[in-house]
Amino acid sequence: MVAKKPITICQERFYPHSPEDVWAAITDPYALAEWLEPNDHQPVAGHKFQFRCDPGLCGSGITECEVLEAIPPFRLVWSWVNVPSDGKRPRPKPMTISWTLTPKDNGTLLTLEHSGAENCKWLTRNMMRVGWGVMMKKMISRVLASVDAGKFRPGAIPLKNRYYTCKTIPDHFVR
């Protein structure tokens, strides 16, 4: 068997906001729910959490994660496993999502590295590449408009305007 060539999806985006504000946008569970998916995230190394939305084209709607590293407000690393929807396929190998926040020009350069993407199908991998780009360009920017002094105020992206649906998931995930 030939080993798969490692594939890492990389995205960078500059935000005219402090690292503390960008940190809030990528760690506050309410902020994450608005730009990514409903979750029970806490930025503490060892914390296991899930992103949840309704099942769809990308599977079961459940992504199981663990915070592998959290150094506020500079670095956050998650393990990331998309749970298969049919329960018959084997669990894929975990991927790693790394966020690096670098102070720059009175703002923050946010770098995303999504490694382990070789374990996904071509279509899924390309959907993730496009999705992360949209999230970093449009969605995080919208959420940052509701962050002040490192605190997020919910309501930047109303539930009806989010890209996912969550009619079938537990209420404690919906924010």
Image (spheres, grey):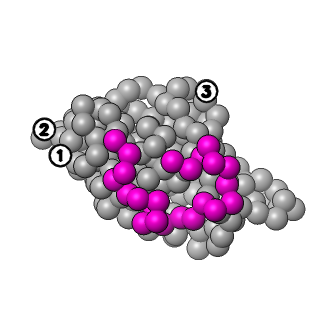
SS under mark 1: loop
In the rendered structure, which amino acid carries the disc numbered 3?
A: Gly
Q: Which residue is mark 1?
A: 16
In the rendered structure, which amino acid carries the disc numbered 2?
A: Asn
Q: Earlier in the sequence, mark 2 or mark 1?
A: 1
Task: Tell whether position 160 is magenta.
Answer: yes
Question: Which of the numbered marks, if any, corresponds to residue 106?
Answer: 2
Residue 112 x/y as whole percent: 41, 48
* Closest to the observer, 159 or 66: 159
Residue 170 x/y as whole percent: 67, 49
In the rendered structure, which amino acid carries the disc numbered 1?
A: Pro
Query: How far, Cα to Cα, is label 3 from label 1?
Result: 31 Å
Query: How far, Cα to Cα, is label 3 from label 2?
Result: 32 Å
Count every numbered label the image shows and give the total: 3
Question: Which of the numbered marks, if any, corresponds to residue 46?
Answer: 3
SS under mark 3: loop
Q: Relative to residue 64, is residue 6 depicted above or below?
A: below
SS under mark 2: loop
Question: Which of the numbered marks, if any, corresponds to residue 121?
Answer: none
Q: Earlier in the sequence, mark 3 or mark 1?
A: 1
Residue 40 x/y as whole percent: 58, 39
Task: Specify start and end residues of the magenta stretch as a single range.
Answer: 153-175
Q: CB atoms at circles 2 and 1 under 8 Å apart?
A: yes
Residue furthest right in the image: 88
